[in-house]
Amino acid sequence: RFKRRRDLGMARPGEERRERRRVGALLGAYYRIEDSDAAPGGEVSAASAAGELDARGFNAQQYFDTMVASGKMPELVKRAKHLDVQIKQLDGQMQSFVYDNYTNLTRAVDVIKQMKFCIEGLDPDLVDLEQAIGRVTSVEQHVEDGVSGRSMQIEVLLKRQRVCRQLQVLFALPSTLSRCLNRGEYGRALEAYCCCLDFLRQYKHMPTFKNVLEDVEHQMNQIGSALEHRLRAPYLSVDEAVNSSVTLLDMGKDHTKVLREYLAGRTAVLKQSLKHCFCGEPLHAPGFGRVDSVANGAEMSKEEQDMRRPESQELQSACWRLTDSYVPQLCDAVEGCQRLQEASEGSVADVLLQDFVSQRVQELCDRLFGLISDRRPPVRVLVSCVHSVRDALRRAHAAMPEPVSKTFMAFLALTADAALRWTFADASSRLVSALSALHADCKRLQESASSGLDDVLEQIAMAEQALLKQSFGALLDSQPLLKLLGPDRPACQRLFAEVQRQELAFFWVFAEVC
């Protein structure tokens, strides 16, 4: 090394610069330092070397000479101070880097020592673990050798076990169906029957399975009979009736027969409900029949008086029960039948349902018309009650428009005609009573010596007022019947014609009495 230094000190300045340049080039190539100021031939320009302190191959003497020759003393002093500041900053950064590296190195040494201590302490445990793994491997091999010879036998036994369980279920199927029949669990019975039916029919040539199949079929026939009897029960709800019908259809029963049984059961339920609606008992519903003006002590109007009449209360009670009980049950029955029709083919089910709806609505109209004819409520109360029933039937009309519309429109026309007849009949009766009273008064005045012509004329004037009042009163009372018929133009025309006939009959009564 000292020989090398002596050689460099004795070397010529040109050789020394070339050596430094070579070393700098090697360091630059090693650290991948890009030199934008290097000449294409690898030489550093004098301007670059003189002007850039960080350039590779920097010549300090040349830089100093250039600065002294071209610069002024204040600028040189300022430049020197700036360089001192940079040198101090670089020294501080270098010291910080050295300290950080030393600290990291110290920590690394400590961690390595700890890891070495821990790893050295694990040697006995690793040896024990290796021995345990070896024992587990040997035991596993021993078990595998012992089981491999019997694996086929175990598989055969497992198959036999599964078959025995299936046979146990098959042989217990009759008793299972009997329990379901006693408990009313018809859906569960059908599910168990469907699961085992294919197997029993496939092996029915074997006497054992043939006997089981016969017992199962006997139990299913009993379940079918129980379901059919249940469908006709008047206490069964619509959902329960639909579920029972679906169960019968899944059992393979005739679809038309099942529909007939379903509709027969719904008929029994609706007849019982209709009977309850016209039982004649007073209705105790919240707010029913309440008149606010009476509660306040005010005088009642004519409409309020009509609402409180016994015949009005009875009609309102019946219509309220119809809209609350009978009509919703009818709509539920129709919708349930339509759900059953989804699996049906042909028009037989449609005919059955139309007949059912038509008959049930006709029964409702007959009972309601009978009550109206017997009790003869005020026309306004009549129209209001019938409108409430009509509104309740909209749901049934949406499902079966033709039978509902046809039957109920005929009922409306019949009711309007009857109401018109008894309205004019009552007016004629009151007119006859007024004329009879007039004749009696005239006879009494004629026999009395103190009476004069003025008294007779007064009685006649009162009779004329009664005539006009009864005539116009009948017309006014008949006016709400137009709202009852609604947009049915032919029915309205027939009502007008009947009004003319009743008005003519009214005056004929007047003429005959006179």
Image (cartoon, grey):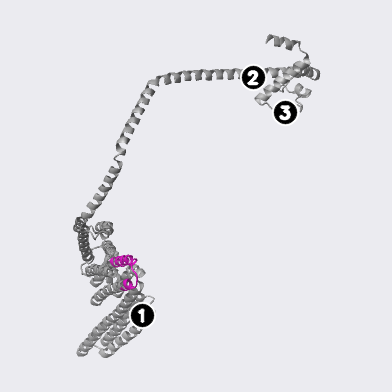
The span picked out in magenta is: 328-351
- In the image, which is nearer the foreground, mark 1 or mark 2? 2
The residue at the point 30 percent across, 79 percent down is 414
**Residue 84: horizontal and vertical position, in percent?**
68, 17
Residue 345 lies in magenta, yes or no? yes
Main SS type for the magenta part?
Answer: helix
User: How many neighbours does mark 3 have within 10 angstroms: few (below 14), some (14-19), or many (20 or more)?
Assistant: few
The residue at the point 26 percent across, 74 percent down is 363
Q: Earlier in the sequence, mark 2 or mark 3?
A: 3
Q: What residue would you read off at disc 1?
A: 491
- In the image, which is nearer the foreground, mark 3 or mark 1? 3
Q: Amino acid at mark 1?
A: Ala
**Residue 301: horizontal and vertical position, in percent?**
30, 70
* Residue found at the far front of this picture: 149
Instruction: Kindly report the distance in space between the C-alpha atoms of the residues bearing marks 1 and 2.
Output: 115 Å
Please state the total of marks drawn on the protein image. Answer: 3
Task: Say which of 325 and 235 sits in front.
Answer: 235
186 relative position to 9: left or right: left
Instruction: Kindly report the distance in space between the C-alpha atoms of the residues bearing marks 3 and 1.
Output: 111 Å
| Number of the label disc, if any, that sits on residue 36 | 3
- In the image, which is nearer the foreground, mark 2 or mark 3? 3
Q: Earlier in the sequence, mark 3 or mark 1?
A: 3
Instruction: Kindly report the distance in space between the C-alpha atoms of the residues bearing marks 2 and 3.
Output: 23 Å
Q: Secondary structure at mark 1?
A: helix
User: How many neighbours does mark 1 have within 10 angstroms: few (below 14), some (14-19), or many (20 or more)?
Assistant: many
Above or below, comparing residue 132 to residue 509 in the picture: above
Q: What residue would you read off at disc 2?
A: 90
Q: Secondary structure at mark 2?
A: helix
Above or below, comparing residue 108 to residue 171 in the picture: above
Quadrant location, the N terminus: top right
